[in-house]
Amino acid sequence: MLEMKSVAMAVRPILHYPDKRLRVPGEEVTEFDEELAELVEDMAETMYAAPGVGLAAPQIGVSKRLFVIDVATGDDEPSDLRVFINPEIVEKNGTVCYEEGCLSFPGVHEEVKRAERILVRAKDASGETFELEADGLLAIAVQHENDHLDGKLMVDHLSLLRRRLVHRAMVKRAASPDAAE
């Protein structure tokens, strides 16, 4: 008789700006083990519960170079969960402006300029290296989440004025009694 192992996934709290841990660069992942598999599952569940299209490990207070993305946006679209471990963007082409949001900046949406097309090299949850050419929302999401791994945030792409306005709004939100929601 096969013994079924039950793994309880968990929704983890997402750090909100101006939490200083969001500025800490992630460390390279070297162990592709059960603990990493559980982290990936928790991150996926957290991202879906938020809901969002991407989540980087530093956003949940885990200093690792890892993010998950699922850009399937419609209810009729099947899930397309992708895991990127120790990613490196090796090529960027073109420029596009896209209105981005971020789970660490609830309610904030800003126009951000990014590469239109990218080539990313990363490892999957098993430690296998892969390369992916991406454009559209997937390219934007990869660049956004990859920034988190370097301690770089969406606001770093904004003008000084927009950055100050977002900073003020987020500090005010953090001080509000409802901020825990």
Image (cartoon, rainbow, N blue to C red):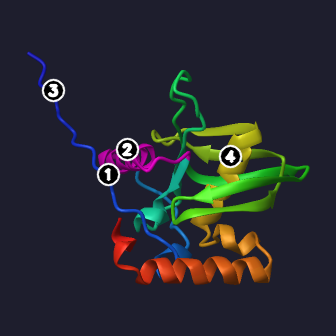
Task: Say what amino acid the circle numbered 4 marks.
Answer: Arg
Quick check: marks 4 and 3 in contact, CB under 8 Å? no
Q: Position of residue 80 (x, y in %)?
A: 55, 30
What residue is pinned by disc 4?
121
> Are there few (<14), some (14-19), or many (20+) residues within 10 Å of tag 4?
some
Q: Nearer the viewer, residue 101 or 169?
A: 169
Magenta span covers which residues? 32-53
Q: Is residue 74 above or below residue 137?
A: above
User: Which quadrant is the N terminus positioned in?
Assistant: top left
Decide which of tag 3 and tag 2 comes sooner along the chain. Answer: 3
What residue is pinned by disc 1?
11
Quick check: marks 1 and 2 in contact, CB under 8 Å? yes
> Are there few (<14), some (14-19), or many (20+) residues within 10 Å of tag 2?
some
Task: Say what amino acid the circle numbered 1 marks.
Answer: Val
Quick check: marks 4 and 1 in contact, CB under 8 Å? no
Q: Which mark is residue 45?
A: 2
Q: Whole-Å distance between the Cαs marked 3 and 2?
A: 21 Å
Task: Say what amino acid the circle numbered 2 marks.
Answer: Glu
